[in-house]
């Protein structure tokens, strides 16, 4: 069982790709080489292979990284399942994980939500997607500074507020305020629930 995240950048036409593509490539590189583990294609679309345990944390981290660029956002479909064919690159490989991910992305292009998951389990899909929909209500509104601090915290979950403050060159009280505004506690609760659910699948 693997997870495939298929996505595209929202509002990319109003930005030069140099504003976001290196951020994405730098993040994706930790999951292995391209094109076997990830690809960026057709200008603003991408596909990434991760473990099923890591999928939601990875997707929310991508959202935080992209939203740290003013006026950008990202639309993603997460597919959990088997990989039945390994091609010369992630975009040429196949299996239920790939199909679910691609279909999810297509189904959310109407703009109502920009992050959705398909695990093959109808009950869990319904629950997880409802929780995602509610979480997107505030994640879609992250400001550049909120997104920036969320990307940092999700990447260093053991770091203290003092360490984060030092890294960003701001006061600890400002870190606390930004994390409160970004609803970090709710994101962590969502990720904790996802971890429990994914073990059942």
Image: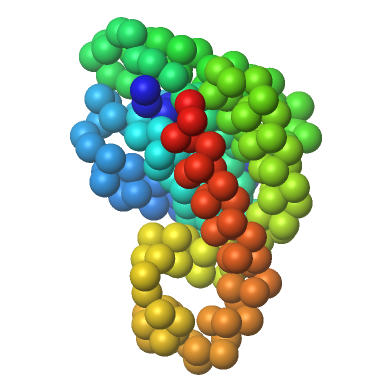
Name the image colouring: rainbow
- Left or right relative to 93: residue 8: right
- Left or right relative to 13: residue 46: left
Picture residue at 33% right of the left edge, 8% below the top: 84
Picture residue at 37% right of the left edge, 82% below the top: 163
Asked if residue 146 can be seen in this view, the reply is yes
| Residue 58 position (above or below residue 103) | below
| Residue 99 position (above or below residue 141) | above
Q: Position of residue 117 (x, y in %)?
A: 59, 30
| Residue 98 position (above or below residue 179) | above
| Residue 109 position (above or below residue 96) | below
- Observer-nearest residue: 23 or 61? 61
Asked if residue 59 can be seen in this view, the reply is no
Q: Position of residue 86 (x, y in %)?
A: 27, 12
Picture residue at 61% right of the left edge, 47% below the top: 73
Number of callouts: 0
In the rendered image, the quadrant that contains the N terminus is: top left
Picture residue at 52% right of the left edge, 52% below the top: 192
Q: Position of residue 4 (x, y in %)?
A: 43, 27
Residue 126, by quadrant, is top right
- Observer-nearest residue: 122 or 22? 122
Residue 97, by quadrant, is top left
Q: Position of residue 58 (x, y in %)?
A: 44, 45
């Amino acid at each position: 069982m693997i997870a495939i995240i298929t996505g595209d950048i929202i509002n990319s036409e109003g930005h030069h790709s140099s504003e976001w593509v290196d951020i994405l490539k730098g993040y994706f590189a930790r999951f292995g080489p391209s094109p076997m583990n990830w690809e960026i294609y057709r200008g603003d679309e991408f596909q990434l292979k991760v473990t099923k345990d890591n999928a939601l944390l990875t997707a929310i981290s991508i959202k935080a990284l992209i939203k740290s660029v003013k006026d950008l956002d990202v639309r993603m479909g997460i597919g959990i399942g088997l990989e039945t064919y390994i091609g010369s690159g992630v975009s040429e490989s196949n299996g239920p994980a790939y199909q679910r991910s691609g279909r999810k992305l297509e189904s959310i292009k109407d703009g109502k939500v920009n992050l959705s998951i398909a695990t093959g389990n109808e009950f869990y899909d319904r629950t997880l997607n409802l929780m995602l929909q509610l979480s997107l209500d505030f994640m879609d509104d992250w400001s550049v500074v909120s997104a920036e601090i969320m990307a940092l915290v999700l990447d260093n979950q053991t770091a203290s507020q003092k360490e984060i403050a030092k890294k960003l060159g701001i006061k600890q009280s400002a870190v606390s305020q930004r994390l409160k505004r970004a609803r970090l506690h709710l994101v962590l609760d969502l990720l904790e629930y996802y971890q429990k659910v994914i073990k059942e699948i």
